[in-house]
Image (cartoon, rainbow, N blue to C red):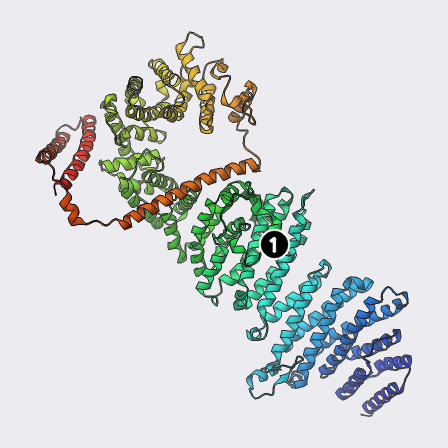
Amino acid sequence: MAGEASSNEVLRRAVEAIKSSDVVESRTELISGLGDLVISKKCDICFLFENLIAFWEDFTCLDVSQCTLNKSIVQVASNYVVSGKSGVLSLFLVLGTKASLWSRKHFKMTIMSMEDSHEEEHSKVFYQLLLDVLNFSAASFSAPTDSYAFEENNLVGIVENSILEQLALMKDLLEHITRLESYGSEVLKVSQLVIDSIIRFCGEQCQAKSWDSFSKNPDKEGIMDCEGTISVNPIINIRKYAIQRLCELGTVAAKGGHLVSILNTSWKGVVTLLQQDNGSLEAVLDVSDIILKLISLANHSLRSAAESWSSSLKEPISVAVARRTFVPVKFYLVNAVKISSFCPTQAFLVHREIILCVMMISSFRVSLSTETNLKIASEVSSELLEQMSMSLLYSILNPDEVEEQMKFEIMDRLFTSEGCHSSSQEDPCGHNIMQMEKIFSLTCDSISCTKTLILGRVLLFMCLLRSSIDAEENVKIVITRKLGWLFNMLIDEEVYACILSMQIPLSHGTKQKTQFVWEPMFLSLLESLKTFMIAASSSLAWGELVSFLLDNIFHPHLLCWEIVMELLCFLMRYAEKNVASSLIDKLCSCFKSVACLGSILDPNSAVRKIARSISMLVKCGAQPVADRVHSSLIGGDRSQLSSVMLVALLMEGFSLQLLSDNFREIVRKRIITDYCGFIETFHGKLLGACGSSLFGAPVFALSASLPSLQVNESGIDKKTLQFLFAILGTLSESSDTRVSYNCHRLLAETLGIFSHMNGLYKSNEMEAIILQLHKLFISKAASDTQQQRSKAELALFMAGFGHMDMSETEECKKGSAVCGLYHMLLRERHWALIHLAIASFGYFAARSSCNQLWRFVPDNAALSYDILGGYEVSEERFMCEFKAFLEKERALPELAPSSEQILLLQEEAALLKEAVRKKIQTLETEEMDCEVVEIDHEQLSSKRRKMPDGISKGVELLQSGLKVIGEGLSQWQKTQPNSLDLHDKLLTHFSCLEDAITNLASIAGSGSN
């Protein structure tokens, strides 16, 4: 006790001596001596700090002596803070606040007078003092504190003031960090300690039980904060001011790359304090403004990069430079995502800014992909920003707090067709939509009416599809309903051209080892859609997705239709058996309903389109799928409708190899029987009277099925030769347009059949056939439309010339005719015919016994002309192109489309777009007609004319005769089972006759009612 009393007396005498001293240097020495005293009692520590606070004078420092005095005060105070003395937090913070306030004023004066050499020593002492003040502040907030101390009302205001002042000092220091010279790194290090201690202090003390009394006791007297407002719960104010100041520090630190540690600490502190909150801060703190600041920092970094890279780059951007640019952006986005997850309703308040941010990032990535020197930057941006931008978007789409209607509005704003129409004044090569400097000049109000972001929107939608596994149920439904928007965008000329020509980087591998592969944007789109199909398969969106695909099975735009079929094929490969069967059943039902509409010879007719779809899907399924189609559409039915569907399927590539052995044999026999029956009844003179689109169906069926059908040539070879002679003879004799049209259709298919029967090329009749073909194609005008349509099959037919012997003398008529035909074919300028001609000639040249192959190539072959002008002819150029074709040297190592290629794609897109417009217009007109026309059945019935009695009686006789024939055929099959071939022929004709009489009876019946 005597020792404690003695210590107390020594302390008080020392304090009195300091007060009585008027010399600064003496006061400094006496204050330093206080640090040697051993003080343990709380009252003595309080007495000491009260006097240290009083000894710190607020007036401006005139010379180094004042800095030295204050430095000694801080050093003495630090001894007791570091030693772990507790219970005097308020005094620690008051002294720290006073020291910080004085240091801020002094620092501003110091940076203004640094050029004065006389102030150099002063500045040195001040910076040492500044470091001591910062260390003391950090130690103060880390000092142990009794929880009951927070019941003191005055402590709340002290804590608030201290936090505000400490962080304000650091903000000033960071803004002028480059002026601190050698002390800059030390100041940064200690500043980080202060920030850490404040964050830790707020986190630990704000969880103390004593704080609960402020919120649980409504009668508790209000506490006046530093701004003069009344707060019932002091913890909210302390955290509020800490978060606000940390945001300011984080914003200042973002301006300089050397402040990375402060940047990380500040924003992580903001996230930590918000994460510990239970929603009470949202009432007094504008969290949405914090999210907005982070988004603005991200946009600013990207804008700076765009301005720097939009100018001409002589060298490619390195990985290091790209990462220095995009790592900070990712950091801002990560923190924005975290805060948005804590406060989803606050995030929704700035959903317009979030939408703008993710769209600009997506559009910026597209721009990077188009520049060779920015390929690395594009890969790095994909690695760092793609997932983060999606997470930011999902932060306003996934939360339950956001109403479903709001989510629809967000998607409508993201994926709108407004302002996305092509303009004739824009750059025809499409680069105007990828100019980086335009992207970051947009605002929230302008994004809905600009074409600048159109490709960015498409890429963003692709990313949304790829990441849809993270989406909630209702979000998947919203995405499904936006697939129509995607199709509308693909019709746009520029989007169409870019989707087919552009490449984008896609990551492969694990998180530890990511490798980027550049793939065409179209393939990436398909993969994204397939990923979404998997994500939606177990959700409520699945039904809508399948309905969307089926609704677009007849989409008039080729690219959209191909996407639909690719997705349906994907479904057939991997979906469960019942799902695949259900899909096939729906398409078969649709096929039956459209089989009577349009012509099977028109590739764009509904019957051909649905047949094409079914054939593609069957190839992706197992054998039971093909059998299911056969049973549903064909089976044992011999009606005209069944024949239409069978021929349509075969013409669209339905492979008979997919059928089971039993069904395949049934179809094979039917095709051969119908073919032979048609040939035997063929008469050229009747071609002009035949207007049915099904005329010649057996020939079309055999021609289409031969690639997958094993046929014994000996059974039909002679008949095929005779049929070909008959067609050629009819063409040479008749001048009737209808006859010529039907004959050329049959000629083309017959030549196709011939090309699959190599044995026929060695027949004696081949010379006569070649001479007639030469006469037909060489003598007639080259503009003959029907003749042009037959040249594709003629090229296939001529490839088989390599299987026959041929003399190379001038006197050989067959050889001369073959030369003439190849001359005619190789002169064709159409790209498709050029390809077929060169392929045919290549097959012929590889198998022919002829040595003088040059005789078959004309001097003016299409491939002999120069590419640029198309006027100069060179035999060497033809041989070079021919060699390249045979050796497959045309494959490009990478896709690098030229502006001319993009222009051609845009022209193609414009034609497709116009076709879609006309189709839609036609459908709308038909719909209007259906809505406007009202049928008065009574009036219509009264206006019907009665059929003459002779017609009705004749139809009845035909029906009776048909019944007798049917009974006779049935009886014949039972009594003479060995005459199956003849029976099948008669049955084929009977089926056709039955269809014709049934239709006639229907007409007669409707007319007589």
Image coords of residue 385 (percent x, y): 59, 54
Which of the 4 image quadrants contains residue 868?
top right
What is the quadrant of the C terminus in the image?
top left
Most extreme residue toward the top, as rendered?
A: 811
Quick one: SS at disc 1?
loop
Residue 897: image x %, image y %? 56, 37
Judging depth in this view, the residue of 210 and 976 nearest the camera is 210
Is residue 109 shown to the viewer in this render?
yes
Instruction: Report the residue marked by disc 1.
Output: 440
Relative to 341, residue 320 above or below: above
User: With 49 as the anchor, is 432 left or right in this view?
Assistant: left
Quarter of the image where one finds residue 360? bottom right
- Residue 230 percent location from the top left of the image: 61, 83
Is 658 left, or right, of 504 in this rendering? left
Q: Does 798 sit above or below residue 302? A: above
Q: Is residue 203 visible?
A: no
- Foreground residue, 494 or 881? 494
Quadrant for the N terminus, please: bottom right
Which kind of residue does numbered mark 1 sit on? Phe
Answer with left or right where residue 955 lies relative to residue 528.
Answer: left
In the image: residue 880, left or right of residue 1007: right
**Above or below 485: residue 776:** above
